[in-house]
Structure formats: structure tokens, C-alpha cells
Amino acid sequence: MAVKKRINLALQGGGAHGAFTWGVLDRLLQQDDLEICGISGTSAGALNGAALKSGMISGGREGARENLDWLWGQVSGISDLRLSHWLAPFGLDKLSQAMEYSLPMAISDSLTRVVSPYAYGPFYRNPLEDVVVRFDYGKVGAQKPPFFFVCATRVRNGKIRVFEGDEIGPDALLASACLPTIFKAVEIDDAQTGQREAFWDGGYTGNPALFPLFRDDLPEDIVVVNINPLEREDLPTTPQQIQNRINEISFNSSLLREMRAIDFVQRLIADGTLPEGRMKRVHMHMIADDALMAQLSVATKMLPNPAVIRALHEAGVAAADQFLADHFDDLNQRSSVDLPAMFG
């Protein structure tokens, strides 16, 4: 019997673009000789992680796949995403552009710049709440593999807050996905500080955090599912493009800082400056499709279009399939991301 490759997953946030991560997970869960041991997730990545974890405990790999399918059916508002095939001929780039300049997007964008979510009074609601309350949190927070970590940002001091175990409930997931221009801060009694704290989206401080995956009982390999393009060749010139790129850069910055620190530590281990065992050896991997994501805009993150979600799922499946073909043998052996080249 073949020995299973053991990995951790680091799942980025990015609104409806998290459907790409759904596709990646869908493919990884079909790889019988791959074991997911730990998951760190932020925003949409946290929702994906919660669906995978609870589904895995309830029904194994197929249970996880079914739960992820249910989640994205809820997000898109369509129970069967195959019904969106009729939009496929228009292409993702044209759909994205149409959504970017659509009236709903224009109204939403204008409102978030001049109206606080606190101004809606009794009419305020967070649409994600109807989804997250339906998870089984006895399973989401169970202290058994895959171990699950949810990242949010504490508003008062700007520090990252990582929720785990029975700390993870609906409020922790809502906090992780709380964009402050759209949603009211999520208030939680924080055991770490001993007071009631307000939280915003975890993407500002950890998108996602990698350090929870450094535990001794977790494997050395971290697979980052990246949905915010690290690079864009074209200079953003329109207000929408500029705002979108600002969002991408800010939501990648914490991940890049941690990866730079990992690169530094691994070089110290490699040249003997740090003795073996003093710090954990980490193998970094990444599944992404920057070319695809570069076609999309902030509109496709904010307005969950069923055709875009379905296309992103298919792209995620293809990206994971390519990763496994190219780098499966690297897992538990070496990094497939060239960190020195990335930060050179």
C-alpha cells in the first residue's frame, strides 16, 4: 500500500473567487494517497475550510465534497450550478467587464464610499449569516484532523486573531469575512484579551496565516491556494482597476511577509546557522491561476454570479490536477515554490 502524502492547506480569501479554491479542494479530495492534516483559512477560505472539515468528519472525502458543493450552491443562489452553462459562451473576461460596469455594482461601490454599514439601522443584515449558521460546529471545531484555524483581524489593536477548536462558531466565520465597508464589525467575547472585541476581515493581517500550521504534529508541507494575483502585467488606470489592485496587494502582503520569513529560516537551516530541529523545516507549494484571475475584477468577488462560480470551480479543478501532475513527487520532500527567486 502506497504511503500517503501529508499536507496542510492555506486557503486565501477573495469573496466569490473562493469558488476557485472549491475546485482545488474538490480535486485534492479525489486523490486517495493525499491526506489533508491542517487547514488555515481566511474569509472565503475559512468558509471552504469549515465545509471541508465538517463534511470530512460526517462522511469522509465524499462528505467533504458534498458539503463544499452545498456551500457554493448557497453562495450562488442556485442549487445546481450546471444550470449556468448557458452563460459560458460569453467568456469570463466579458462577464467580468459587464459586471464591473453594471448598475448594481455602481450603486454598491458608491454606497460603500459614502454610507457606513452602521447607517442602515434595523434594515442591516449580513447575507452570509444564513449560510454559516447551518454548519455543524461540533464537527467544524472538533479536535481531530484536519485541524482547522480561522483568521480574523482585531479592530482595536490591528492584530491577527486565530480561532481554533470550540472557539470557531458562526461569529468567527463572519468575522473572518467581515469587509468593514460592507459589514458591521463582528463582536466576540475574546478569551485572549478577556474583553468583548470587534473583528474585521482576516485578510488584513493573515490571508491566510501560515504560523498555526507550524505545529509539531502537522506535516512540513503547506499548500497555499492563492486567489489574489501576485502579479499583474498591465498598469491599472481606471478607478475600478486601481481599487481592485490595491485590494489584491493589501490582501497578499501578510502572506508574502510570512513566506519571506519562511525563506529566511529555511536558508539558515540549510547553511547550518540554525541547528536541525531548532526551527521547523517547511516545504512551500502554491496552486494558483494568475492568468485567469487577472481577467477578473472586484465585481466578480462581490457579486456571486453562477456562471463565474462554475467557471472558477472548473479552473480550480484543472489547476489542482496540473499541480498534482507536476509536483506530487515533491510533496514531503522539497518545496515546489522557489522562495529565493520569489524574494530575490
Image: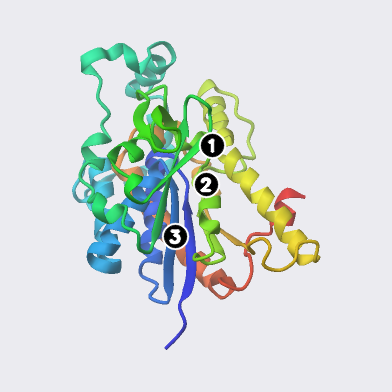
How many other residues sit within 10 Å of disc 1, few (<14), some (14-19) or many (≥20)? many
Kind of residue sitting beneath label 3? Gly
Q: Residue at x 35, y 25 (%)?
A: 183
- Horizontally, residue 264 falls left or right of residue 214, namely right
Residue pointed to by mark 2: 209
Residue 38: numbered disc: 3
Kind of residue sitting beneath label 2? Ala
Color theme of the render? rainbow
- Horizontally, residue 23 falls left or right of residue 281, namely left
Residue 205: numbered disc: 1
Q: Provide residue 140's location: percent of width, then percent of height.
A: 30, 53
Q: Provide residue 314's location: percent of width, then percent of height.
A: 38, 56
Q: CA distance from mark 1 to mark 2?
A: 8 Å
Q: Residue at x 33, y 51 (%)?
A: 50
Kind of residue sitting beneath label 1? Thr
Q: Residue at x 62, y 64 (%)?
A: 336
How many other residues sit within 10 Å of disc 3, few (<14), some (14-19) or many (≥20)? many
Residue 57: numbered disc: none
